[in-house]
């Protein structure tokens, strides 16, 4: 059946459910399960309004889809903005119940859906944004990732799993996709001239982070879907369904033990392969061909655009492609937020480029197949839209989750801290703004901001002093990922939120002073030990009793801090 017909039937069902709730004929808990399957969340500071998470499979978004998102933001969200997530999704906030279905219909017309953006399902399949253009990839993983994404969306097998499942694809030697922190990570590998993957299973972040482990030496393309289906079958059959905190795949791996889990998957795969449907067999006809860039109106070379940091922007935001004469441009999106007019600017640039746009898990965008001679013109267009920010992948390029502004389970407001760090990098840390350091912030231990795998990670917490609560951030240092390896940040001190920018500044300055030539932050930390940082940070962690009023206010907040966190709907 045509996907458009299916999507319309789903939206009619959602509209009927909304009407039934209003009439009191459908219990709110049942409606919650339904709406979460459509990526529709309740909001912390806007009772009765919703947050909508839109899936962007593989992070690939077309110009028409960007324009549809711009129109939807203007028509259906109070702020006229959207937010890019670390899962290559796009979120809109403050949507009224009566606007929900019209917004989804408008997005569906552009080929976008929020279906299975939440709930116990396979979430949006993510992909390295450089897939297809990276000079050192063995092959383009995009077609295989698309096959997996299409096969699992709306698949009955994945509609009521014990908890969510996250899948990522990587083709580069550098782990842009962060495969070890996923339930299932697929890394491109060629054996005897045939493309395939090394599959890693059982990773995840949250309060109990785990690194994924390799299932077998090599998995061929024809066996990719049967292997994934076998993993999902075991998870569906044996995964924890009573205690939500123990319901992720990583805990099932621990329960079985790696050897038993591995054997169980490979045995189950034999049954899946023998009985697979034509839908699975026809998914790629045995091979996955590499994507060619779609045709587009060429970007015309333009004269050099003087001033406003063009040279610095090129040095931090531009990457050579394997296609001669073309580059990929990282559009840095401070705080991960985009206005409707900025979405339209990006759509216009993508329409003139042959490679379109891809979202990154660092809350930025990648504009691909830009002719080298057109860089100055692209920079000028981005600057006019407020999007020509240099420093991609540097200390100024902060990743953050939405936090307590919208999320039920968040403790703090990462936006306030991220804004303070942006300001700090322009002023007090301007000499270090291009230092190759990653900073990632989450509003709670759940790690939606990926704080576990950052050079400097922070997550929201609270300290009780007498009868008052002080908003704090727990500091972690030295996190990173590589293929088959995840080093989770080591906890240091818990710092009041108001002092967290200064704590980050001290760590950055320490690194600039302590490092040897060419030494990474991780290597410097290994050589000197995290204890070297504690004397610098200890004064910032001190909390007098009673705490001063200034420390009892979160960064960017207008009112005194209150501890309001409760179970979020991701665990519902």
Image (tube, rainbow, N blue to C red):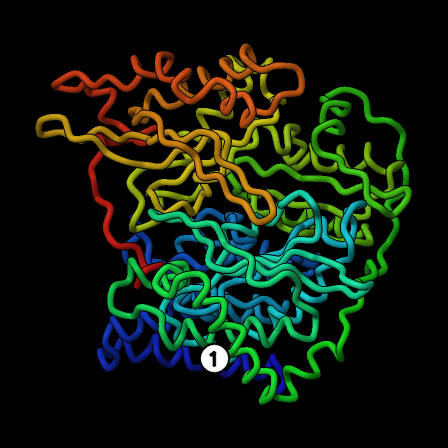
**In the rendered image, which residue does mark 1 sit on?**
157
Q: Secondary structure at mark 1?
A: helix
* Residue 326, quarter of picture: top right
In the picture as drawn, the residue positioned furthest to the front comes out as: 259
Residue 266 in percent (x, y) is at: 54, 73
Q: In this view of the protein, which residue sits in the foreground, 371 or 46?
A: 371
Residue that appears at 21% across and 44% down: 564
Locate residue 431 relative to residue 383 in the image: left or right: left
Q: Quadrant location of the C terminus?
A: bottom left
Residue 456 in percent (x, y) is at: 46, 29
Residue 337 can be seen, yes or no: yes
Residue that appears at 42% across and 64% down: 164
Q: In this view of the protein, which residue sits in the foreground, 371 or 157?
A: 157
Q: In this view of the protein, which residue sits in the foreground, 5 or 120?
A: 120
Residue 82 can be seen, yes or no: no
Seen in the picture, residue 458 relative to 406 is either above or below; the reply is above
* Residue 384, quarter of picture: top right
Residue 363 in percent (x, y) is at: 56, 44
Residue that appears at 84% across and 56% down: 296
Residue that appears at 75% across and 77% down: 286
Q: Quadrant location of the N terminus?
A: bottom right
Residue 380 in percent (x, y) is at: 76, 33
């Amino acid at each position: 059946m045509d996907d458009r017909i299916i999507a319309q039937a789903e939206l009619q069902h959602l509209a009927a459910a909304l009407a039934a709730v209003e009439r009191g004929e459908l219990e709110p808990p049942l409606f919650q399960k339904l709406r979460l399957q459509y990526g529709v969340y309740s909001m912390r500071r806007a009772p009765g309004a919703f947050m909508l998470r839109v899936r962007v499979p593989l992070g690939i978004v077309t110009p028409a889809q960007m324009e549809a998102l711009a129109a939807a933001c203007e028509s259906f969200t109070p702020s006229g903005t959207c937010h890019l997530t670390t899962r290559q999704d796009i979120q809109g906030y403050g949507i009224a119940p009566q606007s929900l279905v019209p917004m989804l219909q408008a997005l569906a017309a552009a080929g976008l859906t929020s279906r299975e953006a939440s709930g116990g399902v396979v979430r949006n399949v993510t992909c390295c944004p450089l897939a297809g253009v990276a000079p050192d990839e063995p092959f383009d993983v995009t077609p295989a990732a698309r096959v997996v994404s299409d096969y699992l969306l709306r698949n009955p097998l994945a509609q009521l799993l014990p908890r969510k499942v996250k899948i990522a694809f990587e083709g580069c030697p550098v782990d842009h996709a962060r495969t070890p922190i996923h339930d299932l990570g697929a890394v491109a590998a060629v054996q005897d001239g045939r493309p395939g993957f090394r599959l890693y299973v059982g990773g995840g972040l949250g309060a109990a982070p785990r690194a994924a482990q390799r299932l077998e030496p090599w998995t061929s393309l024809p066996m990719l879907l049967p292997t994934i289906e076998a993993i999902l079958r075991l998870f569906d059959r044996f995964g924890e369904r009573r205690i939500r905190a123990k319901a992720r795949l990583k805990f099932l791996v621990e329960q079985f033990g790696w050897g038993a889990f591995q054997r169980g998957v490979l045995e189950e795969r034999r049954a899946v392969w023998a009985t697979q449907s034509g839908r699975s067999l026809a998914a790629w006809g045995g091979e996955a061909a590499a994507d060619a860039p779609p045709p587009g109106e060429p970007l015309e070379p333009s004269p050099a655009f003087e001033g406003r940091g063009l040279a610095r922007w090129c040095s931090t935001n531009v990457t050579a492609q394997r296609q001669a004469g073309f580059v990929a441009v990282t559009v840095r999106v401070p705080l991960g937020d985009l206005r409707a007019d900025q979405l339209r600017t990006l759509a216009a640039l993508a329409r003139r480029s042959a490679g379109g746009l891809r979202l990154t898990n660092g809350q930025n965008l990648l504009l691909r197949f830009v002719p080298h001679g057109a860089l100055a013109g692209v920079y000028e267009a981005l600057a006019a839209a407020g999007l020509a920010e240099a420093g991609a992948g540097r200390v100024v390029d902060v990743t953050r989750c939405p936090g307590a502004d919208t999320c039920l389970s968040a403790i703090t407001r990462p936006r306030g801290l991220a804004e303070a760090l942006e300001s700090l990098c322009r002023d007090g840390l301007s000499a270090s703004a291009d230092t190759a350091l990653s900073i990632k912030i989450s509003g709670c231990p759940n790690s939606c901001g990926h704080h576990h795998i950052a050079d400097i990670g922070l997550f929201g917490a609270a300290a009780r002093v007498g009868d008052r609560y002080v908003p704090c951030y727990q500091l972690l240092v030295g996190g990173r990922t590589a293929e088959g390896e995840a080093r989770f940040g080591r906890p240091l001190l818990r710092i009041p939120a108001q002092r967290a920018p200064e704590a980050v500044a001290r760590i950055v300055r320490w690194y600039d002073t302590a490092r040897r030539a060419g030494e990474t932050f991780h290597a410097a930390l290994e050589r000197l030990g995290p204890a070297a940082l504690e004397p610098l940070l200890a004064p910032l962690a001190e909390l007098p009793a009673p705490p001063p009023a200034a420390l009892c206010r979160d960064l960017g907040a207008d009112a005194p801090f209150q501890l309001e966190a409760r179970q979020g709907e991701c665990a519902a």
